[in-house]
Amino acid sequence: MRRPLCAFCLSALGVLALCSFLPQTRLLLPSAAIFVVFCLLVWWRGGAARGYAVCLLLGAVLGVGIMKTTGARLAKIQDAYAGKDVTLTAEVESTGRAYTAGRVSAVLMVEKVDGEAVRFRVECASLPKCEAGGRIRGRFSLDVPDATQRLDDYADGIVLSAEYLSGMLRLGPSESFRARTARLQAALSRALRKGMAENTGGVLAAMAAGDKSHLSSALRSAYRGAGLSHVLVVSGMHVSILCGDILSVLLPYRWEQSYRRRRRRTVWKSLLALVLMGVTGFTPSVRRAAVAVWVSAL
């Protein structure tokens, strides 16, 4: 009787600790309780299973810590720049449709704010026409994203919304890894959309290459209204297919294989995950899956 009671107490303490870190997620209490109880039961079995349970719990604690650190960084950036007019030097990560002819919407990776080196993403709804993979400089007004769009923006790593004011200069193509993969993404998107209907090609490009720039506002709204926005996002499933099924065709797995062959397979798997992460713009869902691939490879 004493052992189950101790397990229950430890589970309760673990859940309370998690909830103290994340007070806004108290609705997840039952799931957290089940997770902690499961880990404790695995630990109770002893042997090798105990190590797995410890790893699961440490992973959960690490995840909570990263979430808090990311939230604090996001709040710091918003406190520093929201509501201000500033000069931005930025790399154009992706472009999309805008309501006005000759303009595009864009996601920018900011390199400098008024000459000060920084690194965060903003989204601009209307910008003079430019290409993904290029660098620009101009005057912008920064603000916190609209409440209806805020969660989607945060999921894509976008901290602030930017309104273009004046004086945009094109500084030429960027040679960063993200810029190179952005150009690769654009080429893949063109190949996927070739000969297809506009909406069908746009959905395929979004699902396969992470290029949402060819999705109309009506189509986005329709997917959002149906609760299917996640279908238009490249996720861990894509990483699994590329680094698992497709790699298995290119490099067939054999149970009896040399260490050199296993090492070569691991290197290719890690590189494929890195390329996909770059092509899709380092979105959190792909980053998580890529990290899992690297850890399993290691």
Image (cartoon, helix red, strand yellow):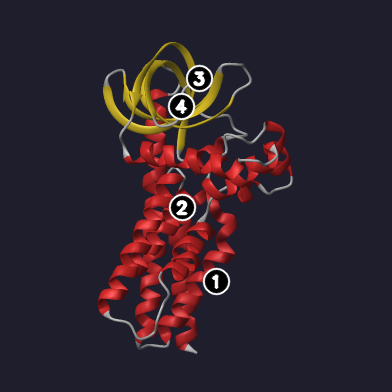
Q: For the residue carrying disc 2, how many other residues have a C-alpha within 10 Å: few (<14), some (14-19), or many (20+)? A: many
Please state which amino acid type lies under the numbered disc 1: Ile
Please state which amino acid type lies under the numbered disc 3: Lys
Q: Nearer the viewer, residue 110 or 71?
A: 110
Disc 2 marks which residue? Answer: 286
Please state which amino acid type lies under the numbered disc 2: Val
Q: Is residue 252 above or below residue 82?
A: below
- Gap in Å between the C-alphas at discs 1 and 4? 48 Å
Quarter holding the C terminus is bottom left
Q: Where is residue 33 shown, x and y percent of the image? A: 53, 68
- Gap in Å between the C-alphas at discs 4 and 2? 23 Å
Tell me which label, 1 or 4, sits earlier in the chain: 1
Residue 89 occupies quadrant? top left
Tell me which label, 4 or 2, sits earlier in the chain: 4
- Gap in Å between the C-alphas at discs 3 and 4? 7 Å
Q: For the residue carrying disc 3, how many other residues have a C-alpha within 10 Å: few (<14), some (14-19), or many (20+)? A: some
Q: Residue at x 59, y 32 (%)?
A: 147
Image depth: mark 3 or mark 2 in front: 3
259 lies left or right of 276:
left
Disc 3 marks which residue? Answer: 129
Image depth: mark 3 or mark 1 in front: 3
Disc 1 marks which residue? Answer: 34
Disc 4 marks which residue? Answer: 131
Q: Nearer the viewer, residue 273 or 20?
A: 273
Contact? badges 3 and 4 (CB < 8 Å): no
Q: Secondary structure at mark 4?
A: loop
